Image: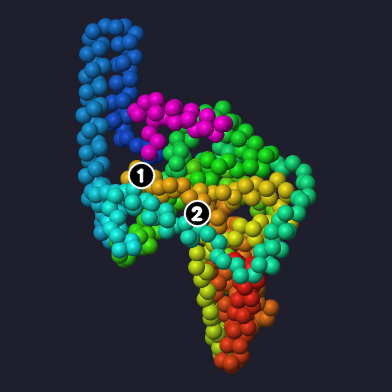
Amino acid sequence: MAINTLTNNIKTAANTASSNSLNFNRIRRKTVHPPHILQLQYVKRSARALWQRTNYPPHRQNYNKATQELKLALKEFYREATDNQSKSLDSKDGSLWRKTRQITKETEKISPLKYDNQWLTSPNDKTEIFSKILESPFQPNDNEDNNTTLEVNNTLNQPLQLSPICKLFTPAEVRNTINRLSAKKAPGHDYITQPLLLQVPRRTIVLLTQIYNAMIRLSYFPSTWKHAHIVMIPKPNKIRTDPFNYRPISLLPLFSKIFDRLLLLRLLTHLESLLPNTRFGFRKMHSCPQQLHRIIHIILDTYEKKQICLGLFLDTDKAFDKVWHNDLLLKLKNHLPDTYYSLIQSFLRRRTYSVIYEGVQSQIRYISAGVPQGSILAPFLCLIYTHDIPTPKSDSLTAAQFADDIAVLSKGDTGEQVTTNLQNFVQEIEKWNKNGEQS
């Protein structure tokens, strides 16, 4: 009820606000005017103030004349600025292409889809078929080892150890998180955007902070923030009549993204130590270029020593969509306070989605596996899920991980030696997969 009240009040305020005073679709940039326009603005303000004091008709005429001169000067200024901008466009730096795309951009239509020897043309049929296709990726893989599943479930059913009350959020933390969000992100089903939240008064921020703190106390993630609108984007250079050649983009409510950022800072203090130093991606001071430099250094060092270096590169298919919730919770249970653990459990359970296209929404379906796309918590939880993947025990092997990608380098004096070491390590990873660690 508190969430619905807050959302409705913000929507009502936005709808009733003057379009001239507020613009939530873009951030206004301050224009620097030349001195002659600043002088005309000063003359206009002085003439208006004099006429308002005296109500003398000649003063009104002077005010109207100053207003007209300012309008003409501004019109000429903006015309020259537009001409200069057009002349500065260049095809070499891409500015000409970006401006052309901005002017001619149109909403991309989904072509008629062919599925099961039938053509689907209406928006309702398209959304329903996309929703049906997405239901399979959001389901866990079949686990043939029933003993592992039973063991995981029994461990999760054991009582939690009570922990002290977790530190609550402050309005300053919420406001700072809102300021750091991108203004270009598409909104979720509540249509609340970041520029809109920048305009709300402090009492609204306080109410939102109280909702977040109630979520911490109750260890409950609201169901309305667990529903995602999914927009389908065609994959480049693919046949557009095939519904499997479209990529889903998940749109979550902005309020849930704010809470995810706040919660992630608290989770890092408990979980970041679990991640090995060789795991890069979605971590502070662990960017992709750093991992590339590390790999290149090893390859060059092997080349200088005139040794053999063999590399194996692994990519997990649908790694984020196939995360087994129970196994993830098992790996979190012994490292998080009971409040945060129960909150993550509520965060993952009974998430829903629906596909939208041209104002038509498909039926609501449930997500039984995976971490939610569009949430800042998703990549971090996926890293925790795979933190115990085997690591090389020998100096002749080097593992480099970035998100769900793994590169393994094996170096030695002979080809047989490096091949054997690499094969043995691959068998360890295969065993880790079969044991249900990545169901």
Is 25 on the left-hand or right-hand side of 223? left
Residue 394 is situated, as x and y percent measured from the top left of the image, at: 68, 81
Determine whether 280 is above or below 175 in the image: below
Residue 11 screen position, x and y as percent: 44, 31
Taking depth in this image into account, of 279 and 79 the one nearest to the observer is 279
Q: Is residue 46 left or right of residue 340?
A: left
Q: Where residue 90 is drawn, which disc sits there?
A: none
**Residue 360, disc:** 1
Name the residue located 31 percent from the left edge and 25 percent from the top edge: 41
Label 2 residue SS:
loop
Pinpoint residue 382: horizontal percent, then vertical percent: 58, 60
**Residue position marked by numbered label 2 in the rendering:** 373
Neighbour tally class for label 2: few under 14, some 14-19, many 20 plus, Cα within 10 Å: some
Q: Is residue 23 magenta?
A: yes
Range drawn in magenta: 1-25
Answer with mark 2 or mark 1, whichever residue precedes in sequence: 1
Badge 1 marks a residue whose secondary structure is strand
In-front residue for pair 300/230 = 230
Instruction: Work out whether residue 152 can be spotted.
Output: yes
Q: Quadrant of the N terminus?
A: top right
Give the residue displayed 24% in from the left and 49% down from the top.
104
Q: What is the three-letter code of the residue carrying label 2?
A: Gln
Relative height, residue 284 to residue 394 (above, below): above
Q: Quadrant of residue 195?
A: top left
